[in-house]
Each structure stands twice: as C-alpha cells, then as structure tokens.
Amino acid sequence: MAFEYATRNNVKNNFNKLMKTAGRDWLEGFLKRNGLSIRKAEGTSMNRATVFNKQEVDHFYKLLGELIEKYHFLPKNIYNADESGFTTVQEPGKVLAAKGQRRVGSITSWERGRNITALCAMSATGGFIPPMMIYPRLRHSPALEKDGPVGALYKCSKNGWITEELFVSWLSHFCEHSKPSENEKVLLILDNHSSHISLAGYEYCKKNNIVMLSIPPHSSHRIQPLDVSFFGPMKASYRQECNYFMKSNLGQKITPAEVASLFRKAFVKVASISKAEAGFKATGIFPYNPQVFDETDFLPHAALNESELVIENDEPGPTSSFTEPVHRTPEKSAITTSEQPFVFGLEVASTSSCINPSTSNNSDVVDNKVLSRKGATVQDLLPIPTKVQKTTRKGREKQHAKILTSTPFKKDPTEKENKKIMKARSKAKSQNEKSKSTKHPAPKFKRKILHTKNDSSSESEADVDPKVLCDDDENDDMENDDTKCVICDDYGRDREMWYRCTVCAYWAHADCSGWDAPDGYICDLCQKYK
C-alpha cells in the first residue's frame, strides 16, 4: 500500500519498481518513527467482540455496587467460580532441535483425548476452594482420586460437563469451606451458564446466605478474575506437568486416573494470593472500580456497529433504550483518532488551509488546493469495509447480568423446572404408548430338528433359538461372578459394551472403564496396584 500511495501522489521514493513494494529499511524506519511494533494478536470470538459493550458492563457494575452497599461484603467473602477443561492429550512445548531441521516431533498420549472439567473458585483475598473434578463416565472409581488436590470433590457425568445437579452438590461443597452466615453473607460471581440457573440452586443459596451474581454473556475474558489471571497460568503449568510425565514414564499414556495427580501439581504452583488479588483488581470487582474499562475497550463493538441492547430497569423512571438507527458503516470516531487525514511522506498542511469548523458551513469540506496536492488518501486505497446485513432466524432471548438469588429472578428457574417436568411427562407417555403397541409381538417360528438315536436325552444346542442365546435379558448364568463388572460389581444390561482387562482378564462396563477403546485396557484395580 505504501508503494501505491507514493505512486499515485507523485512522492519521490526508491521503492522496488519490479516488485511494487516498499523496502525493509523503510518499514523499520516507519515503525520506529511512529512507535509501532509487530505483535501477535490475541484471538477474540465474534460473539465476545460484539456483546462486550458499555451498556452491558455498566449494568453489571451497577448491580455489583448495589449488592456491596446493601450487604457490606468483606473481601474474603467475595468469590468467583468458573469451569475449565483439562484434557488427557498434552500440547507439546518448545524443545531444542538442530538448526534447519524441518520436522521436530514430540510424543503425545492420544490422538483424541478425554476432557475432564475442573470447577475452581477463589476469593478476593487469595483464598481458594478445593476444586471439583468432573469425569466423562457414569460410575465413579476411587482410582480417579489418587494423589488429587486435598479436599477436592470428585463427580461423574455422561460427557464430563457440569449439570444442574452437580452444581448444587458443589454449592454444598462451597458452603462448607466459605462458611457463610446471616451476618456475613458470601457473594458468588459466575457466568450465566444454564447449569447455574436452577430452582434447586436458587433455594439452596437463599437458605445458606449465598448471593449469586452473573456476569454479562461472552464477557468472561474481561470481567471474570479466574479467566483474567488464573486459568492461563494454570493450563500452562498443567501442560508442563503432562510433558514431564510423558518423558519420565516412557511408553505410558495419560489416562483419567493420572489427571488428578497432574492437576494437583500444577494447582499448587499457580494458586497464589498474588494471582487472585491481581485478577480481582484487573476486573474492577475488588477494589470496586466501575470505571476500570475505558472507551478503547469497547471499540470492537463500535466498529462492528451492533445495535445497543435495551436493558430492563426495575426502578421507576425512563429506561435507557437506544432509539438511533443502526448504521451500515462504522463511525469515524471508532476507527480514527484524529479528524486530520494521515499522509505518508508529506508535511501536514497548516490549519488555515485545512478544516475550519468555526467558519465553514460543512466541517468535512477540504480546500481544493489540499485535494490537488494530496491526490489519493489512505481511505481511498484501503476503504473501510461495510457491514453485511444478515437475515438471522430468531434465537433464544439475550442474557444480561443478573442477581441470580433475587426474588424476581425466581420466576425464571421455576418456569425452567416446569418445562423440564412437562417434557419428562410427554416422553414417558410416548414410551408407554410405544410399549403397548409392542406388547403382543408376532409369534416366533422355530425350526424343528429331527432327533436320532445317538442324541442324548438332554436338550442339545441345536434346539435353542440363537436369538435366545444372545439375549441379555435372559438369566443364562447369573451365578457366575465373571459376568459382573470388576468396577461397579453389577451385571450387564441390554446392548451394553464391555471391555476386558489385559492384566487380570476380568470384564468391566465400557462406561465404568473410562476408556475410549478396548485396546490395551487396564482396569482401575490393576492400575492401582501395579
């Protein structure tokens, strides 16, 4: 662009005419003269860029200020809680290699690992609640707790994600360590995930003096202390522990049974008072600072020209709604910081020959002499893109920061619970109708077999229907302990997958094993005593 600008404005230069580019020396001088440097950008999703706006953030800090003024929370009683995933496949770190070598490999545990969710919480004074580990399996095993964090809570779910029931059980775990009381209530700040919004959780918090406040959606990267100062170093330390484990234990893979031990080593290194204090200070939660974000933090939202959100105001008076139409191109103030155009390699014209807002009827009109000197502007060569208006279907209602334990909010989890009950009833009704229709199936025809004199009096294998032999509902041999799962000590169900241990040769349910495939499977007992 520098070459094209200089060519169209007849600026003398020694650029490369063949390649039509400016040289490296010019680039280094340009960066040095303007105080610029080449940086690696931090990826931000489109949702986070468009939703993080001043109206939502101001609404959150308004609610936070009202709660602090009403309950007078002590710093030790202000907590932030959030979940994050930790995988069994480590990310290879940097290694020493021969200069010029094109491929540098590193061994990882699996091609596609399993994700274990860790729910962490910390206070503004640096107090950490023992985490809750959620494993992607149906039945719990004591082997998963080996060398884990002291006082941690271990749970299981089908996909390893948190659910409403697990969150309520974590609230009980949280209450035991934070010890809220009538005189010293506890403030719990978290995101508005669906598992955090339930009638059981609402009633438990109201009963145990816990005040829950949710942050605006898609804003955890700026407002949530755990995301700002803790989870980044925590995951980096966890990756280091995984790499050290793979190098120290040659040929051994990282399974869910080793995750708790690796997590504990990383957690002890990172969970410090300084990181907790830095996270709460950077987000303006404690010390309370509603002006922690300036206008430049909201520029992505302004540049993308999203319409401002209308936030409901419970107090009487006019609501803060946005009535201006949505623009199709970004505003000039959102992109440039000066009204005067920037020109490469030219001296800036005096103010008398440029815009004179006090005397001119139109402040955007520039003198003809300046236009003739300037030729082409940067905006001509690199115009600001216009926003494409997409027709989107109606989605779910937009979320805002809310006090999840306030009395008006009880209506939302109550409606959610009623919908869940109605859905369960309709599902049970459809299953009953389906079972009635299949209650009298068509008769099965068996093949008749002629017996000879050499046949024994007992029934032979040929007389048995092959479908009956494969039917798991039949009590073929319930007295044999080999048919029991070595982990849960329970029998199998219809159409259930089993894995056989390569060490002790006992069988286990696939859901109990915690493994993705039967290849090389070792049961929890053999892993514990090996």
Image (cartoon, rainbow, N blue to C red):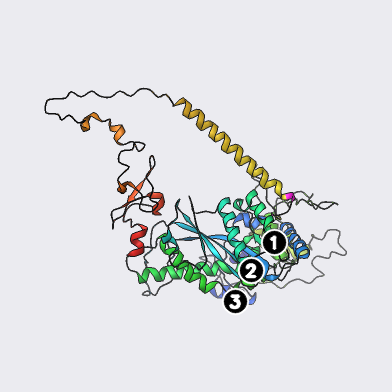
Marked residue nearer the N-terminal end (3 or 1): 3
Residue 73 is one of the magenta-drawn residues:
no
User: Which numbered dot is residue 123?
Assistant: 2
N-terminal label among 3 and 2: 3
Main SS, magenta region, reads: loop
Q: Does the magenta run of residues contain 407?
A: yes
Q: Give the magenta-colored segment's residue range.
A: 404-408
User: Is 220 on the left-hand or right-hand side of 495?
Assistant: right
Mark 1 is surrounded, within 10 Å at the Cα level, by few (under 14), some (14 to 19) or many (20 or more) other residues, namely: some
Picture coordinates of residue 380, whole percent (x, y):
67, 59
Q: Residues within 10 Å of mark 3 (few under 14, many from 20)?
A: few
Position of residue 283 measured from the top left corner of the image (x, y, whole percent):
67, 67
What residue type is disc 3 on? Gly
Q: Which of marks 3 and 1 is in front?
A: 1
Quadrant of the rendered structure where residue 274 is?
A: bottom right
Residue of label 3:
29
Tell which of 122 and 517 is nearer to you: 122
Q: Is residue 502 rendered to the left or right of residue 1? A: left
What residue is shown with label 1? Answer: 298
Q: How many labels does the image show?
A: 3
Which residue is farthest right? 359
Q: Residues within 10 Å of mark 2 (few under 14, many from 20)?
A: many
